[in-house]
Image: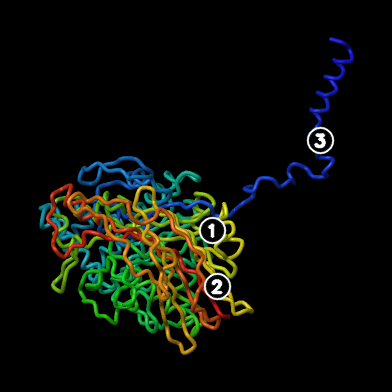
Amino acid sequence: MPYKSALKIVSIACLLAHAPNVFASDTGTTAAQMKYSPHANNTQPNNVYWGDSHLHTGLSLDAGLFGNTVTIDDAYRLARGEQINSAKGMPLKLARPLDWLIITDHTDLMGIAADIQSGTDNILDIPKGKEWHEAFKKGGKAAGEAAFDLIQNFAQMTLPEQMILDYSPGSEVFGNVWKTIVDASEEHNEPGLFTAFIGFEWTSVPKGFNLHRNVIIRDNADVALKIQPPTTQPPTGSTDPLELYKWLEEYESKHGGRAFAFSHNGNLSNGWMFPTDKTYAGGTVDKEYARLRAKWEPHYEVTQIKGDGESHPYLSPDDEFSDYENWDVGNLDISQLKKPEMLKGEYAREALKQGLALEKKLGYNPYKFGFGGATDSHTSLATADEDNFFGKSTSVEPSKDRISHPFIESKLGKIDGYMLVASGYTGVWAHENTRAALFDAIERKETYGTTGPRMTVRFFGGWDYNKADLQANDPAKIGYAKGVPMGGDLVKQKSDKAPSFMVYAMRDPKSAYLDRVQIIKGWLDAKGKLHERVYDVAVSDEREIDSSGRAKQAVGNTVDIETATWSNSIGDSQLASVWVDPDFDKSESAFYYARVLEIPTPRWVLYDKVRLGAEIPKEAELIGQERAYSSPIWYSPK
């Protein structure tokens, strides 16, 4: 090779080798300082993570008594996508794994079920305990009656005091069970892959009025084991939520942890879940009560196995979709029947409305919560799909006759088996799948609850959204830039401009097409009167939305009763809209949330009929419209 040619090659090679440094010196910017990747340092929540925030194992009194032998480890394995066997030996698997789970075993009498069944010395020393043990030895009907008797004594707060003391915080049994729960959570928690939260259920049910709260803990075992969870049975516990708030305050201030509570099943409280004047414990709904509840309860379980809790036809007579999976017979043990005037203190939409009035009166809104869904299954099985529903308890796992047997029955009334609801899950918008990220997202209310399907729902509120924003390659980026996501707050503007809302929903790939997207508004007018209104903002199949903001034409129904199948020949796979409030008054406080409805599909009872030959009572609903509820966005005129 000629000398000059070789020299040129070497020179070019040297130049190329040093090219990056040449360019860096030209710009005066290092590679670390350059901004090129649009995703670098982005903490915008771009992922929705699915989980069940309310699940019980046999460590819970009312799960263990009814034969739940599925271990806490198997509960996690199922949630993570593995196949396991139910307590009755039936193989099952979720259609898709969950991303996270909270096992919320009841703290009252943790571990007692196994001791009653085996007959430990401390149980046999108590006459009532010996009676229950003997009944469980007989099995069958006697065991079932003993289980109901024990639970009723718990609900009516008539349990033997020594029994309560033996299974209260500070006792050896209680401490061991709590450590078992925490250890299992630690073992199955894998940041980035699966989040296993530490949690529990605080089971306040004075005289059968459901005031239950679940507690979710952000921390790991090193903090969670510094303190034992509270109970509700006297003499060691209290049914007053204010005492739970004191425990939460101590956990955070004394032990450096993070936790909050969320309630469920207001529909079984007979009006006491969302008080506006007096609390069940005899206290007053005053400024301090409102402040504490707003602080410690930022989330609400709006749908689950024991009924849907969004609204009720009595409260929302103009909403044809409010008559959905309502349980309105009585309180939790049906020791008191329901009266219409009780409903105001039971349902989420009405609570949101009452919260606006209380905020104006007290300065705090005690009912400013986000929405989620859960199963409340007592089988260790987080099943919320209609075609894979394993019931509330082991006694109502899939069988030919589970539909026809009463689930709860008293001298006053009953809840039939077919009324159980295959619901629900919570979708959480977060930037990663960790305890910290998911906890923070639930606390800031960037969540939505569904009755089981995993549709994708985004909901933003602001002042400048337009239809072109929906055509962007990343509408969510615009959503955050121009406004706030679900769970956020809009504040008064100088102009009279009405707020705009960007909402879009995509079907669950394993479920049905969508019927419509609605925005539900509640507001407080200048005279102190509360209002609500439902607006259809996006509907499928090119149906018309009229001047009243409603699409009066139903989507149709493709369900085949004989085969428990349906067709996605109606509805749309995705719906979206930018909607401006046509009735906005900037002087009136308000909230807005999105409700997404699927086309009609079979309820679980229809699958039981087709697969098991179950006889279905004529009163049973065979078809339903699954749905999602976004957390609200609030507007304040302050």
Q: Earlier in the sequence, mark 1 or mark 2?
A: 1
The residue indicated by pointer 1 is 470
Q: Amino acid at mark 1?
A: Leu
Percent from the top left, x then y, of residue 264?
35, 66
Label 3 SS: helix
Is disc 1 in contact with disc 2, using a CB cutoff of under 8 Å? no
Question: Residue 21, which numbered label?
Answer: 3
How far apart marks 3 and 2 lie (CA) works out to 51 Å
* Mark 1 crowdedness (10 Å alpha carbons): few <14, some 14-19, many ≥20: some
Residue 489: in sight, yes or no?
yes
Picture residue at 40% right of the left edge, 53% below the top: 573
The residue indicated by pointer 2 is 499
Q: Earlier in the sequence, mark 3 or mark 2?
A: 3
* Mark 3 crowdedness (10 Å alpha carbons): few <14, some 14-19, many ≥20: few
Residue 171: in sight, yes or no?
no
Residue 317 occupies quadrant: bottom left
